[in-house]
Amino acid sequence: MVFFFTITLIISIAGMSALMVLKQIELSSGVVILARVRPQVNRFFHAILLIIERSIPALAREAVVAVLKRFRAALQKGLAHGILWFETTLQNLLHLLREKTHPQHHRGEASAFLKEVGEYKKQIETTAKESEIEEMAK
């Protein structure tokens, strides 16, 4: 990299020195050197200047916009896949929870304690229903 910049500096110094020498010759002699070629050189450098000032920045803007559009589309697609994966995972967990809590999974016999609790619960429910019926009858 240093080699490139050194060469560029040397070429720039040589070019500027040559231009100064040519300008000094023109001023001392009063004759315009390469007068016929100057309009063509002017048009050439004007075209290059237009390319550098307008075309390259416009192309760069278009490229940035295209990259941003692709990034946005990829981000939307990624978010959609992530949401779909999350939804599928939640559905699988819900199905698993339903399977685990469904009463058909418990096929073994209940313990004596659970039977006693069940009978007590039934007794409370029947007494509650009977008291409701009595209140309605009043």
Image: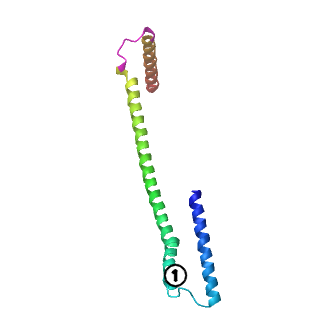
Position of 94 relative to 76 (above/below): above
Amino acid type at circle 1 is Asn
Magenta-drawn segment: 105-113
For residue 114, what is the image quadrant?
Answer: top left
Position of 8 relative to 109 (above/below): below
Residue 5 rendering spot, x and y as whole percentages? 59, 61
For residue 118, what is the image quadrant?
Answer: top left
Magenta stretch, main secondary structure class: loop
Residue 108 rendering spot, x and y as whole percentages? 36, 13
Residue 31 rendering spot, x and y as whole percentages? 59, 90
| Residue at figure coordinates x 45%, y 24% from the top left | 132
User: What is the count of numbered marks?
Assistant: 1
Lateral position of residue 80 relative to residue 22, left or right: left
Residue 95 rendering spot, x and y as whole percentages? 38, 30
**Quadrant that contains the N terminus:** bottom right
In this picture the colour scheme is rainbow
| Residue at figure coordinates x 65%, y 88% from the top left | 28
Q: Kindly state the secondary structure of the residue where label 1 is placed.
A: helix
Front residue of 28 and 126: 28
Lateral position of residue 88 relative to residue 9, left or right: left
| Residue at figure coordinates x 61%, y 86% from the top left | 26
Most extreme residue toward the top, as rendered?
112
Most extreme residue toward the bottom, as rendered?
30
Front residue of 85 and 87: 85
Magenta-drawn stretch contains 22 = no
Circle 1 is placed at which residue position?
Answer: 42
Q: Residues within 10 Å of mark 1 (few under 14, many from 20)?
A: few
| Residue at figure coordinates x 46%, y 64% from the top left | 62
